[in-house]
Amino acid sequence: MQTAFTTDQLATPRIAEANTILRKCVHCGFCTATCPTYVLLGDELDSPRGRIYLIKNMLESGEPATAETVKHLDRCLSCLSCMSTCPSGVHYMHLIDEARAHVEETYERPLFERQLRNVLAYTMPRPVLFRLSLIAAKLASPLAPLARSFGATRIAALLGLVPKTLPAPERFGQPGTYPAQGPKKGRVALLMGCVQSVLDPGINAATIRLLNRLGFEVVVSGEESCCGSLTHHMGKEEDALARARRSVDQWIKAEVDAVIITASGCGTTVKDYGHMLRLDPAYAEKAKAIAEKAKDVTEFLAAQNLPEGAGGLRLAYHSACSMQHGQKIRAEPLKLLRRAGFSVMEVPEGHLCCGSAGTYNILQPEIARNLRDRKVANIESLQPQAIATGNIGCMTQIGSGTAIPILHTIELLDWAYGGPRPEKLGTTE
């Protein structure tokens, strides 16, 4: 793709990088076949290729983003399926991140939308505040149909995602050091997380139990919670980078062999810390070192040569977009579950997003709901006893549309290798 940035524009590192990415695009359109919003809407501007044109024109002009451009950029899920498909190596993730930062800096959204985004960006990364917000939202959840009837679809979507029961805080997973059982093989840090630590604290507890049994000391820092992913994908770069720096500081201080992450959306961001902080001389090298140590929990376990187990259940495995497209982790979770004794089926149209995508299912509820229903139909066609996945957002999104139990992969592996039976399975045999 030809670009027309000025010499002064190219002197700006962010524009220079965008220019490099843009010039790799050859207009082939392979990305359109795997883009969820293009598959649903059929609009070229709601495909990666169309958005690339919009971003090019927006950045070249140097002008504030327009309402039309923002509409189509906001519809992007950042599922990164296009990056798995692209034969030219266009790094769409970095391009859309830059575009969102430009939108945040130059475009004034309508008041209600602006306030909603600010509330989400402030509450969700703060576990204590997020828990209090969920309690308040639960009280208001019966009003969801009324909100929808008045056209307040985003409020209705938010209320619809509130869990029926909020789990109590899990002691096993709070900040601290959890010693290895038996001979110590290594020392790892575990990202406590923000949303996941509130919605499903049992995920980190299962991770710690299994890693401890395998001989790893686990450190959970009390100084970090959110990795910055949520605000990063909303274009709020100052907040995201501050959270990234804080996480880097804590994990450097912990002196660990690896940083274990149980939410694949967070993993994609942490593995990109080296890029995000490349222009910060105080953090560039430290961030790169942490990014290289970051491992999804299944990626880490795949190297541990776990024994064969007898899990028994028939599972549908949903590969989160951030796992398969963002981190390129595809085979490891399937192999681990099968080795543990589970019968695992891959979901039809598995490359398409479920519609969660951070705050997307709140900010773009209609598209998200259509994607969820499509995903649920594909999963239910397999008639599984349970669903396994590796991302809390997917668990919440898919779980809102089906009665089939949905669990994190690590919960099933912990159970298969000596941990407690997950309560979510109920009496499923």
Image (tube, grey):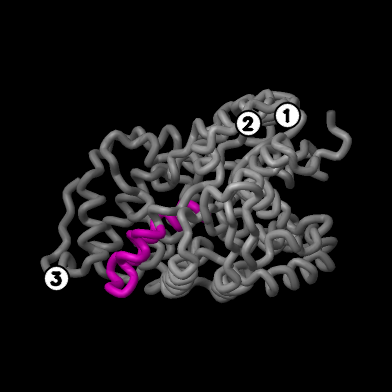
Q: Is residue 139 left or right of residue 336?
A: right
Please give the range of residues in magenta: 266-290
Residue at x 38% of width, y 53% of height: 292
Q: Please rate how many residues cluster around mark 1, counting C-alpha atoms within 10 Å: few if below 14, some from 14 to 19, many from 20.
A: some
Q: Residue 179 or 271: which is nearer the viewer?
A: 179
Residue 149 horizontal/vertical position (percent):
76, 59
Image quarter for residue 102?
bottom left
Q: Earlier in the sequence, mark 2 or mark 3?
A: 3
Image quarter for residue 134?
bottom right
Q: CA distance from mark 1 to mark 3?
A: 60 Å
Image quarter for residue 177?
bottom right
Q: Indicate the secondary structure of the residue bearing disc 2.
A: helix
- Magenta segment, principal secondary structure? helix
Residue behind mark 1: 311
- Give the amino acid at mark 2: Leu
Residue 8 numbered mark, or none: 3
Residue 192 numbered mark, or none: none
Q: CA distance from mark 2 to mark 3?
A: 53 Å
Q: Indicate the secondary structure of the residue bearing disc 1.
A: loop
Residue behind mark 2: 337
